[in-house]
Image: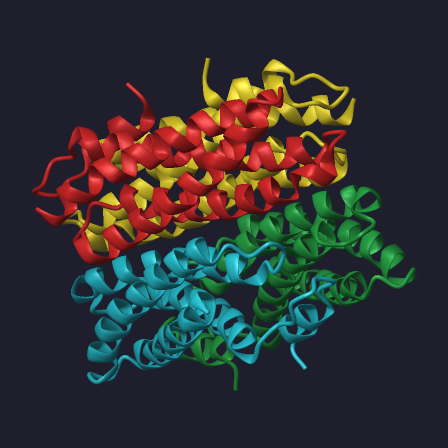
Chain colours: A red, B cyan, C yellow, D green
Amino acid sequence: MSFAEAMAHAHPGPVGASDALIACIRACVDCAQACTACADACLGAENLQTLVRCIRLNLDCADLCDATSRIVSRQTLIGPELVTAALRACAMACQLCGDECERHGAHGMEHCRICAEACRACERACDLLIPEMAA
Amino acid sequence: MSFAEAMAHAHPGPVGASDALIACIRACVDCAQACTACADACLGAENLQTLVRCIRLNLDCADLCDATSRIVSRQTLIGPELVTAALRACAMACQLCGDECERHGAHGMEHCRICAEACRACERACDLLIPEMAA
Amino acid sequence: MSFAEAMAHAHPGPVGASDALIACIRACVDCAQACTACADACLGAENLQTLVRCIRLNLDCADLCDATSRIVSRQTLIGPELVTAALRACAMACQLCGDECERHGAHGMEHCRICAEACRACERACDLLIPEMAA
Amino acid sequence: MSFAEAMAHAHPGPVGASDALIACIRACVDCAQACTACADACLGAENLQTLVRCIRLNLDCADLCDATSRIVSRQTLIGPELVTAALRACAMACQLCGDECERHGAHGMEHCRICAEACRACERACDLLIPEMAA
């Protein structure tokens, strides 16, 4: 069991942690790290000049995933409106960054290919948690 | 001239920094710091138990203002969709946190009163930048 | 293979990612999330008033682990001095937060017990990476 | 009066906020934003390839200034050891990033020149707060 899952189940609050919530925490944390690493790998790549848009999106996506990972990690007095707005912004960043990384991944940039996977997984995890928040 | 304004004008890109952009950077940075300080001041207050919702919102608002301050500080290849989604989430957090802080501010919690001001200013600055992004 | 490990190996730079580096990235990311969740679980606990120091340390530790996880995720032109200073600060935060959480964990606070584990693991991972940076 | 100063004075704790503390909060917040903006301005510059080390240091410095700005913004149960470790890491990042930015600033990169100023101011503010923490 990951620390994220163990912590979510150990929360003293009345509402238990759903599978979708735990999956979203993990996905945001993984995507934030992958995007930080991808921006750095692009910075060290030979074709740096062609990767400017990718780095820009990586940095934005890392920042939104980071903020969202913190917000969804909090189970005390959840405010559905605020969480939903964060999840929407995060899913949007993951979609745009995933699209850009996928393109470079298809041209042999292995780190972009892996980062695109992390972005897709995070976009899905956010999209799956949004309806649960509205319920 | 603040560092934020000087940096925004020094950007080498073709598009200059608007007043709304510079105001939004400053407001996000100030609100993130105020919310971090407000959560901590609440933590040190005698009536801590009545401030749980305020702390929760302070922490979320700080994280979203922080992420948004970074995103709006980036002027290279701005993606209006992503920036707008971040601004919306940030404005929502500022509105909710501002409402909560304002209530405690009206009951003599001075740090909540000041933090509510920072939240209101940031909500306004985000709301003013959103239409400019769509243009 | 985790995203962190896959990304570390996919970096285009001349220096490969060591096991200690990959372990440290994971440990920092896990500890940042655990500390954010622990601060929130403490905030929702009945004995909140006895957990003020724990929340304070959780928040500081989360912020330092977060910054350090980003810094060690970057493999382009690593500056050993800067990385070492970040690792030292992170290890110090993990030690202090781990001590505090361990005490509450021994008194039945399950989320503090788990968070203490994450702090210990992160402190160790930072301590193991420091000599490698100096080499 | 800035929000940072007003918030620091409004803290309910027994210990008042010193001038050095307030100055350090402001300097960390300003430097984090300047470094984020400098990394982005470098990314949009024509001579991007010569600015890789600058971007790398900007990103690290922004992350450490951000974490440190949050830690020094917290006045509840200050732990001098942890704060000092954070200040040392932050001062080190500011020194290295300031050196790099200064070099590019001397060659006409205006955003690097301004960012170097923010780094120097933050390094000084951290250095001035360290002895106060030890007292």
Q: Name the residue at 16% across, 53% down.
A: A77
Q: Is residue D57 above or below residue C105?
A: below
Q: Name the residue at 70% across, 62% down.
A: B13
Q: Name the residue at 46% across, 13% down.
A: C1
Measured from the top left, where is residue C63 in percent x and y? Answer: 48, 47
The residue lying toward the viewer, choosing from A114 and C83, is: A114
Q: Residue furthest front?
A: B135
Measured from the top left, where is residue C37 in percent x and y? Answer: 30, 41
Residue D31 lies in quadrant: bottom right
The residue lying toward the viewer, choosing from D53 and C78, is: D53
- How many numbered marks does the figure carry? 0
Q: Name the residue at 58% across, 32% down.
A: A37
Q: In the image, A77: left or right of B70?
A: left
The residue lying toward the viewer, choosing from B92 and C84, is: B92
The residue lying toward the viewer, choosing from C60 and C30, is: C30
Q: Is residue D127 above or below residue C51?
A: below
Visible residue check, residue C24: no
Q: In the image, D109: left or right of D56?
A: right
Visible residue check, residue B91: yes
- The quadrant the N terminus of chain B occupies is bottom right
Measured from the top left, where is residue B106 in percent x and y? Answer: 21, 85
Measured from the top left, where is residue A5 in percent x and y? Answer: 26, 27
